[in-house]
């Protein structure tokens, strides 16, 4: 077998040719490689070496792309000249089905019990989803507990003494309005079904009704038009113009109107009037299964904080104002779980109950401060501010015990919905539990010498809703040198995988050993990936797709010239060259902020 001097370009092209070329082909153009920097001369050489015109063109182009991706002759890679054009309206066009498919395909979220055809309202977090969820919870805890002197943590049990829920009002009042379809036996939340009369433009005559499920405004109108067309089909009114729909949810219709409103399942008026449905999951504790053993899975984490108020206050030696934070599972037997993990039956909450003195002039500054802190946190983890908004609860929307409540909303593909709420709850909860338990849950203020039941501000955020909002915010498309790229633009601090380590060639021990050593150092700090399969450009794309913010390539300049490594940025595709000892400080600053 003839020998030839080791050359990086030869190895680069040999990778491309290895699947189909015979060895003699490489010797024929070895001398050409040293001076080839464009595809055209190389294509001619390949053709002279018995490659077809089409195959020669493909291989020459592949070689050029490979050399562009792996050229490390200076600290700024040639990729810095790549033209990246963001597709600004990518999120506007994405559907919820595409988001769900993306989550499953990339190992973020799976339907629960999928091998048994799933279980409505329950979801499992995959390898990347588990990392993403852990990152979000860790950052929230660090922001609102570890970094503050006035908030302590708690982890209460999922099942409380059943009297807890009697005192809190959940046994009697924690319900949603429900309607049944008498023909199909399907159940719907009455406040998520919207009905409108079909009114002719010409005569203002009502000729029927439509009834559709809640969605964004555009989809609701589209579905209503489709149903109206069905209603008018084969009637004298077919093809006539109708007035704009006037939607009302089914809690706002009369019994007479309900008798004309079609069920979404049958298209016929087979719906019952709304009635209350308690959302708590019931279970039994102990060996008996009678009334004395009935208990409930908690529908929220807040009550575990209130019933531990005295314990947390005494053991932490805290003084009001102070807060108690908790992250934990909650369960609600939703009538119609929908919109993926936005509304599910098992979910996780991150809540703070921040206790303050009573008084009409006291709560507002605290409430406003928590509103701003909450929004700042959401933006800091990567939520798109242009998709966020505020919704102030007023009138019937405000709970009877609350002084104020403001939601931070987010524009999901299915419409604008509540992401988190910041409520001024007054002293309702501590008062109820004090009366229900017979134990005093008051506080003695040593400065004012007053004894009172504290009021509280409650910022409450659903982990799963935040995960969905982060995925939506991160969804991005662009064009790199004319080629479309679809990727997740996670903030580095929440990204499931922080860094991908890529040795240039997997069959060169010198490269692999150095890259592996760096990988072992990085994984002590962050979740990092190791990828040796395929061309570097393909590996970059795999990392982009799952939201990895940085790729590190170990190449021949690393081992031959001690020239450090190449670090590629996911969003810009730009590359920089850094000495090995500067890699961890650089990444720490980019990921952790210090």
Image (tube, rainbow, N blue to C red):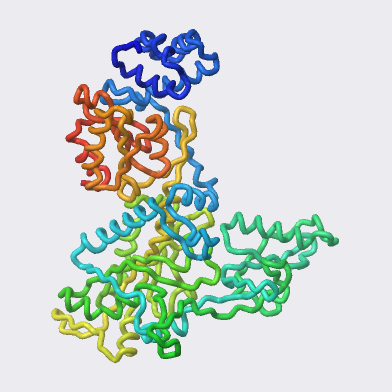
Farthest residue, direction right = 236
Q: Is residue 470 above or below residue 427?
A: above
Foreground residue among 254 and 328: 328
Q: Please state the horizontal and vertical placement of residue 518, each as a whole percent of the image.
A: 23, 37
Foreground residue among 299 and 530: 530
Foreground residue among 594 and 336: 336
Report the number of discs.
0
Classify residue 137 as left or right of residue 21: left
Q: Residue at x 14, y 79 (%)?
A: 447
Q: Residue at x 22, y 37 (%)?
A: 517
Could you say which quadrant of the image residue 391 lies in?
A: bottom left
Could you say which quadrant of the image residue 427 lies in?
A: bottom left
* Res 326 seen here: yes
Q: Please state the horizontal and vertical placement of residue 539, each as a whole percent of the image.
A: 39, 35
Please identify the quadrant where the N terminus is shown.
Answer: top left
Q: Residue at x 31, y 82 (%)?
A: 430
Foreground residue among 170 and 404: 170
Farthest residue, direction front = 1
Q: Residue at x 28, y 58 (%)?
A: 138
Classify residue 305 as left or right of residue 291: left
Could you say which quadrant of the image residue 516 lies in?
A: top left
Q: Please state the horizontal and vertical placement of residue 209, each as a whole percent of the image.
A: 72, 67
* Res 417 seen here: no
Q: Is residue 31 above or below residue 455?
A: above
Q: Please state the horizontal and vertical placement of residue 582, each as a whole percent of the image.
A: 19, 35
């Amino acid at each position: 077998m003839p020998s030839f001097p080791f050359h990086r370009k030869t190895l680069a092209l040999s990778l491309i040719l290895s699947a189909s070329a015979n060895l003699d082909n490489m010797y024929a153009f070895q001398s050409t490689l040293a001076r080839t920097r464009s595809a055209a001369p190389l294509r001619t050489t390949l053709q002279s070496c018995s490659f077809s015109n089409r195959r020669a063109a493909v291989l020459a182009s592949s070689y050029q792309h490979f050399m562009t991706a792996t050229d490390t002759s200076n600290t700024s890679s040639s990729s810095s000249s790549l033209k990246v054009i963001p597709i600004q309206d990518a999120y506007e066009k994405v559907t919820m089905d595409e988001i769900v498919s993306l989550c499953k395909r990339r190992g973020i979220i799976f339907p629960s019990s999928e091998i048994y055809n799933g279980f409505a309202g329950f979801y499992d977090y995959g390898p990347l989803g588990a990392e993403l969820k852990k990152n979000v919870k860790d950052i929230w805890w660090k922001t609102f507990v570890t970094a503050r002197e006035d908030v302590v943590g708690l982890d209460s049990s999922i099942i409380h003494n059943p009297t807890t829920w009697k005192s809190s009002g959940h046994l009697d009042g924690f319900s949603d309005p429900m309607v049944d379809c008498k023909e199909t036996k399907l159940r719907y939340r009455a406040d998520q079904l919207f009905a409108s009369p079909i009114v002719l433009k010409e005569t203002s005559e009502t000729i029927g009704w439509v009834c559709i499920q809640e969605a964004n405004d555009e989809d609701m109108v589209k579905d209503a038009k489709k149903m109206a067309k069905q209603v008018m089909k084969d009637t004298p009114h077919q093809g006539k113009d109708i007035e704009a729909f006037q939607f009302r949810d089914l809690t706002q219709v009369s019994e007479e109107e309900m008798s004309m409103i079609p069920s979404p399942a049958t298209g016929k008026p087979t719906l019952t009037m709304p009635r209350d449905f308690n959302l708590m999951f019931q279970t039994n504790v102990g060996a008996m299964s009678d009334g004395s053993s009935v208990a409930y899975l908690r529908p929220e984490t807040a009550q575990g904080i209130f019933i531990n108020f005295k314990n947390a206050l005494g053991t932490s030696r805290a003084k009001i104002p102070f807060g108690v934070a908790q992250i934990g599972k909650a369960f609600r037997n939703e009538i119609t779980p929908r919109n993926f993990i936005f509304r599910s039956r098992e979910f996780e909450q991150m809540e703070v109950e921040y206790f303050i003195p009573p008084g009409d002039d006291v709560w507002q500054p605290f409430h406003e401060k928590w509103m701003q802190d909450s929004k700042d946190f959401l933006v800091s983890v990567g939520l798109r501010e242009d998709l966020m908004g505020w919704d102030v609860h007023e009138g019937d929307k405000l709970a009877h015990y609350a002084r104020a409540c403001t939601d931070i909303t987010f524009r999901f593909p299915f419409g604008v919905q509540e992401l988190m709420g910041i409520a001024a709850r007054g002293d309702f909860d501590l008062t109820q539990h004090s009366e229900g338990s017979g134990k005093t849950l008051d506080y003695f203020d040593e400065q004012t010498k007053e004894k009172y039941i504290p009021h509280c501000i409650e910022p409450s955020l659903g982990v799963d809703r935040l995960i969905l909002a982060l995925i939506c915010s991160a969804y991005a498309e662009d064009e790199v040198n004319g080629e479309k790229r679809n990727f997740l633009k996670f903030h580095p601090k929440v990204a499931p995988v922080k860094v991908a380590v890529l040795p240039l060639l997997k069959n060169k021990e010198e490269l692999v050993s150095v890259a592996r050593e760096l990988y072992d150092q990085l994984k002590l700090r962050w979740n990092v990936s190791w990828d040796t399969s395929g061309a570097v450009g393909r590996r970059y794309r795999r990392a982009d797709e799952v939201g990895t913010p940085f790729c590190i390539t170990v190449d021949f300049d690393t081992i031959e010239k001690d020239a450090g490594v190449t670090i590629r940025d996911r969003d810009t595709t730009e590359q920089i060259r850094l000495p090995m000892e500067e890699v961890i400080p650089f990444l720490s600053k980019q990921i952790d902020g210090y």
